Amino acid sequence: MSESLSANPLRRPQQHQEIADYLRDEIFAGRIPVGESLPSEAELCTQFDTSRGPVRQAVSTLRSEGLISSGRGRRSIVLSNIRTESFEEVLSNASRIARMGKEPGQILQWFGLHPAQSEIANALDVKEGTSVVSLRRVRTANGTPIVTEEIFFSPSISSIVLGVDPNSESFHRTLMREGVNFNNIARAASIDLANEDDVSNLGVADGAPILEVQVRAYTHTGAPVEYAVHRYRTEEMSFGLNNVRGHSSPMWVEMAPETIG
Amino acid sequence: MSESLSANPLRRPQQHQEIADYLRDEIFAGRIPVGESLPSEAELCTQFDTSRGPVRQAVSTLRSEGLISSGRGRRSIVLSNIRTESFEEVLSNASRIARMGKEPGQILQWFGLHPAQSEIANALDVKEGTSVVSLRRVRTANGTPIVTEEIFFSPSISSIVLGVDPNSESFHRTLMREGVNFNNIARAASIDLANEDDVSNLGVADGAPILEVQVRAYTHTGAPVEYAVHRYRTEEMSFGLNNVRGHSSPMWVEMAPETIG
């Protein structure tokens, strides 16, 4: 890997992002209810001491998320207050559990350097057998097991990862604080049946449905930072997506390629 | 519903959308491979006979989809060619099956006017017992059953829907051609176990995992157009999502709210 993974320390969000974050919070908290208009462009310009460019970009972002109407000359109105997830929630089950108002916990099963098998070596773009720092833990919410995480980090950040105390510190927060540039996340999910490990880790019945999510995180230049496999209990789990005409959906679905003739 | 659902006939896509569609096609087809740069702004301006505004908006769209790097003064490079889905694919399993290179088919089980039960009445924002046009069909790919669809349409478009021949015409394509304004789609998914209907419709074992997706489609003013429940076979099915730092994820996940203390 020729380019440093830590070239891009945590940046201050740009102004259009701050305005979009503010409006999203107002909508999710119900302070601008469904059916009501957003503040006018002029009001937002005054409030954020800015020109119309960032305000328009923020409004356009919310529109592409399906939260507000297209406006067309009139003020945009709130269409939905179904929440979206922050980038940190996408990366971290602990953040997601905390957002649900539950106490995140973990049962660490192993943590250390292991030679990368082919699947992991491919995902991290290293030679098979390269030593990579990896861990397995069961994430809990108020003490209940929710998901088993197996995480493999790029060798280029091994020294930072090995310096983390896995029982008291967050890997993702430490890495981001150290300037590791998590920029893109690609997730691929499928539905599997519980195996022996799932039965013992998650307390589900043998053969119960399990949602397996493979997570790949990259820097802004496309260098792999992390590869992870999350196996979730699925009872009472739900997930959802908003889409807007004129915008492609970032989610793709492939159906039964092996079982269809 | 005071506002007509057909106030907004099919619009010509805006120029920034055309440019984004062109670049996306180039990336998915591998004509701009991962690691290569996009054409310059000047080249795109010449090619589309336009100013920099629409070009920049198109590039910003692809960036928010995780397909290209952030650039920062340099040309953006392609990070991923994991495809996204068009709005039509999100709405229609037939489009999705066709995109996979399979022949979509259907087994129609019922089609007609039925009084709306409470779940359906709520979703369509009508009084319980209102007559709504509904149908149930099993969608096939190369003859293999893939998904059972139950679809309920807003009473405001009943006359158009009842004019469709369900054996030879597409409901969604007919409705859009008639100017019905499908603008936002919200999907909520959960994992269920196969019931008797699933066993007989999809040929799965009793208790096999089923992905249930509830689909709600709205106009640009937030009036409901359609409510549907899709139940998918899950063997060999996969789905995925790209996310980029600085952009919230349009997908939300809720975990086990009932089973956690």
Image (tube, coloured by chain):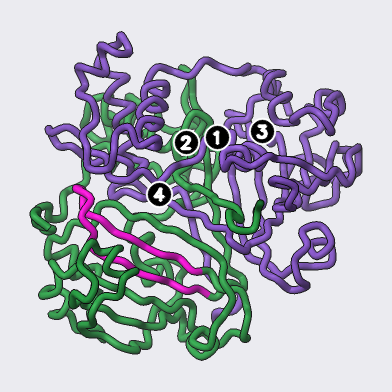
Chain colours: A green, B purple
> What residue is shown at x 87% (from left), y 28% (from top)?
B162
**Could you tell me how far apart the alpha carbons at marks 2 and 1 are, in whole angstroms?**
6 Å
| Residue extending farthest top | B49
Q: Disc count in the image?
A: 4
**Could you tell me how far apart the alpha carbons at marks 1 and 3 are, in whole angstroms?**
18 Å
Q: Which residue is mark 3?
A: B223
Nearer the observer, disc 1 or disc 4? 1
Residue B55 drawn at (x, y percent): 29, 21
Nearer the observer, disc 4 or disc 2? 2
Residue type, label 2:
Ser
- The verdict on a common chain for dots 2 and 1 is no
Question: Which of the 4 image quarters holds residue A149?
Answer: bottom left
Nearer the observer, disc 4 or disc 3? 3
Residue B48 drawn at (x, y percent): 33, 13
Q: Which residue is mark 2?
A: A248
Residue B213 drawn at (x, y percent): 65, 54
Q: Which residue is mark 1?
A: B87
* N-terminal-most mark, 1 or 3: 1
Q: Secondary structure at mark 3?
A: loop
Q: Which residues are magenta?
A: A212-232
**Could you tell me how far apart the alpha carbons at marks 4 and 3 are, in whole angstroms?**
23 Å
> What residue is shown at x 73% (from left), y 29% (from top)?
B1
